[in-house]
């Protein structure tokens, strides 16, 4: 039979209240008693009843996170740090992927709330209609990461996608590139992708280049897709001397295809990425990119949510600074 709280108390020679304190507030129990209780828990294979704990604490100690995709490593490092920080604070993580579909994300938000999530981590500020109002009505602690917008409905723990990409585009232009191409993810329902695209467009326009100085190719995220988009750009009658990519995944695809096409990087064409994933550092030539401190962002987002849940802290936005990383894939045009 499944062991009960009473069974543990009997074996340890203590009250059920003492067992409960050992499990839920161990710092309030003397070490010798705590050790005896935990020995009984291990020996009997006792596991606290989740529903009873929820009713007693009016909290599930779970936090939900919804990311656009789990098919590549864009979000992996930040989510790992997010989960580690939650675990250290006594919280479990429920993770879902929306496949970049706002309606699917909306359904997942409702499902996680129905399951009793104490808080939510979402990506960016673009939601399906009515979801921001739904979240505000519930009063649930929610944080939007991987973007920063102090004026948005949800507090941000993220970085300024526009300024980060603008800095990189300015560098490309300053090196003398005039025929520039940009490979982006679909921008229709992705505020981060739109901000990065606008940054490149504004940098090109601000440098006084003609409109044809920027070619834009929109594709789904993936190494193969990045390669296909790059090949199509390089087959143009007047191919670009620099191909900027919305993230490192697309950039690695472009770099791989350049090798297959016997194009030298950066002598024949420069290639840049965004994120500074581990992959960007090991490919050859190594990618010039924007470093996003994903771990710092994940830790800050977790701490913010825990503070909002446990201390009723008011929502506050946190700006995470990025940095430009110059490597061998970017050089002046020959």
Image (cartoon, rainbow, N blue to C red):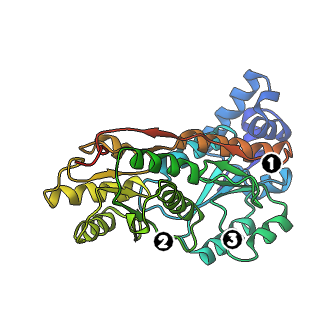
* Nearer mark to the viewer, of 2 and 3: 2
Q: Of 276 and 173, which appears nearest the observer?
A: 173
User: Image quarter for residue 261?
Assistant: bottom left
Choose the circle earlier in sequence order: 2 or 1.
Answer: 2
Q: Of 317 and 182, which appears nearest the observer?
A: 182
* Nearer mark to the viewer, of 2 and 1: 2
* Residue labelled with disc 1: 309
Point out residue 267 in the picture as x, y percentages from the top left corner: 21, 47
Q: CA distance from mark 2 to mark 3?
A: 26 Å
What residue do we see at 48% from left, 58% from top? 200
What residue do we see at 73% from left, 28% from top? 34
Q: Residue furthest left?
A: 262
Tell me: residue 168, above or below residue 98: above
Query: Does the rendering let one see residue 319?
Result: yes
Point out residue 292 in the picture as x, y percentages from the top left corner: 51, 44
Point out residue 198 in the picture as x, y percentages from the top left corner: 54, 62
Tell me: residue 249, above or below residue 186: above
Choose the circle earlier in sequence order: 1 or 3.
Answer: 3
How many residues crowd around disc 2 within 10 Å: few (fewer than 14), some, or many (20 or more)? Answer: some
Q: Which mark is residue 176?
A: none
Badge 2 marks a residue whose secondary structure is loop
How many residues crowd around disc 1 within 10 Å: few (fewer than 14), some, or many (20 or more)? Answer: some
Side of 329 relative to 185 (left or right)? left
* Residue labelled with disc 2: 186
State if disc 1 and disc 2 touch (CB < 8 Å).
Answer: no
* Residue labelled with disc 3: 111
């Amino acid at each position: 039979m499944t062991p009960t709280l009473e069974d543990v108390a009997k074996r340890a020679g203590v009250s059920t209240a003492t067992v409960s304190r050992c499990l839920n507030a161990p710092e309030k129990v003397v070490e010798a008693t705590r050790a005896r209780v935990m020995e009984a828990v291990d020996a009997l294979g006792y596991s606290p009843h989740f529903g009873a704990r929820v009713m007693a604490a009016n909290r599930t100690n779970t936090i939900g996170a919804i990311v656009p995709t789990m098919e590549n490593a864009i979000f992996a490092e930040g989510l790992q740090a997010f989960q580690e920080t939650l675990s250290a604070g006594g919280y479990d993580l429920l993770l879902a992927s929306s496949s970049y579909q706002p309606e699917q994300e909306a359904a997942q938000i409702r499902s996680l709330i129905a399951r009793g999530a104490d808080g939510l981590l979402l990506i960016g500020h673009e939601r399906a209609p009515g979801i921001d109002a739904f979240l505000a009505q519930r009063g649930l602690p929610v944080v939007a990461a991987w973007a920063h917008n102090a004026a948005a409905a949800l507090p941000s723990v993220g970085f300024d996608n526009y300024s980060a990409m603008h800095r990189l585009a300015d560098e490309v232009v300053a090196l003398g590139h005039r025929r520039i191409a940009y490979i982006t993810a679909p921008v229709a329902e992705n505020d981060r992708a739109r901000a990065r695209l606008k940054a490149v467009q504004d940098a090109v326009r601000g440098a006084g280049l003609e409109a044809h100085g920027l070619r834009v190719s929109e594709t789904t995220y993936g190494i193969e897709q990045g390669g296909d988009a790059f090949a199509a750009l390089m087959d143009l009658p007047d191919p670009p001397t620099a191909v900027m990519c919305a993230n490192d995944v697309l950039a690695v695809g472009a770099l791989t295809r350049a090798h297959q096409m016997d194009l030298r990087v950066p002598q024949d064409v420069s290639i840049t990425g965004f994120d500074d994933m581990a992959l960007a550092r090991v490919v050859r030539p190594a990618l010039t990119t924007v470093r996003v401190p994903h771990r710092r962002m994940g830790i800050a987002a977790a701490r913010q949510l825990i503070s909002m849940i446990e201390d009723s802290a008011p929502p506050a936005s946190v700006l995470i600074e990025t940095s430009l990383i110059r490597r061998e894939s970017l050089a002046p045009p020959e």
